[in-house]
Image: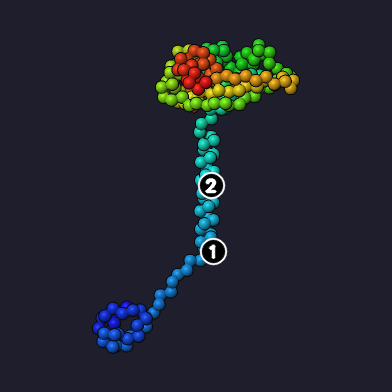
């Protein structure tokens, strides 16, 4: 504070001015605001709930729209393990179904699987375990897309992502398990995920990548 008489700077609790001797009136103290513990706790709870909600939304979006390269493997087991014709229609894009399997609709898929002698009464299951998974870089993806375009007349520009996957397949028949390993390519084409089991034989870049990973 300052002396009311001479204007000298004084401590806040000074009773008189040491420079001019004038008696000083005590300055009123401004009370310090103490935040309410209840309000602070309430704000913390609100922030925590909002954070959990944001994380939940992120996880949901990731599950719905993120990478799902294993989805075709699940359909593969339904097709060749259970003889599921609907899964057959999801396993391959239309171009592959038509040119590779001569399948144009669900009835054709059912006929195709009937010819393979699958039936719902068979005690047969097919399981899979991913052993390795390698995302194709831009060059390998382009080579794979060109291969699929030449083989099935697909649009190479519609390939957005692909993974080379080493998978362990286990067939279970009457309780007996038979295991084998193979390489497949799971790829995203025109917004959906599909599976290719032949590129390992015919696509040079895929063959080279398998050699590098083996």
Crowding near pointer 1: few (<14 within 10 Å), some, many (20+)?
few
**Secondary structure beneath label 2:** helix
- Contact, CB < 8 Å: mark 1 with mark 2? no
Q: Position of residue 146 (x, y in %)?
A: 43, 16
Task: Please name the residue shown 43% across and 25% down the image.
Answer: 137
> Quadrant location of residue 1?
bottom left
Left or right of 160 in this view: 3:
left
Q: Is residue 5 visible?
A: no
Q: What mark, if any, has residue 53 been given in the picture? A: 2
Task: Please name the residue shown 57% across and 21% down the image.
Answer: 91
Task: Please name the residue shown 25% across and 83% down the image.
Answer: 6
Left or right of 150 in this view: 18:
left
Chosen colour scheme = rainbow
Which of 51 and 205 lies nearest the eye of the viewer? Answer: 205
Crowding near pointer 2: few (<14 within 10 Å), some, many (20+)?
few
**Secondary structure beneath label 1:** helix
Q: Dot 1 corresponds to which residue?
A: 38
Q: Position of residue 135 (x, y in %)?
A: 48, 26
89 vs 115: above or below? below
Q: What mark, if any, has residue 148 been given in the picture? A: none
Label 1 to label 2, Cα distance in Å?
23 Å
First-in-chain label (1 vs 2)? 1
Q: Position of residue 133 (x, y in %)?
A: 52, 26
Q: Position of residue 68 (x, y in %)?
A: 53, 30
């Amino acid at each position: 504070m300052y002396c009311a008489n001479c204007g000298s700077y004084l401590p806040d609790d000074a009773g008189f001015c040491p420079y001019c001797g004038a008696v000083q009136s005590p300055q009123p103290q401004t009370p310090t605001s103490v935040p309410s513990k209840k309000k602070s706790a309430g704000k913390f709870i609100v922030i925590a709930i909002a954070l959990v909600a944001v994380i939940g939304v992120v996880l949901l979006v990731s599950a719905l729209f993120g990478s799902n390269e294993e989805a075709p493997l699940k359909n593969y087991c339904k097709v060749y393990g259970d003889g599921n014709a609907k899964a057959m229609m999801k396993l391959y894009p239309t171009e592959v179904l038509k040119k590779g399997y001569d399948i144009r609709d669900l009835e054709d898929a059912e006929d195709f699987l009937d010819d393979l002698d699958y039936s719902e009464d068979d005690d047969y299951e097919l399981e899979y375990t991913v052993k390795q998974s390698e995302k194709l870089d831009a060059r390998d993806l382009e080579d794979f897309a060109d291969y699929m375009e030449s083989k099935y007349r697909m649009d190479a520009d519609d390939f957005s992502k692909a993974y080379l996957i080493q998978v362990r397949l286990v067939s279970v028949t009457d309780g007996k398990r038979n295991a084998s390993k193979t390489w497949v390519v799971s790829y995203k084409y025109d917004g959906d995920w599909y599976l290719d089991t032949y590129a390992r034989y015919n696509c040079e870049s895929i063959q080279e990548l398998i050699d590098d990973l083996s």
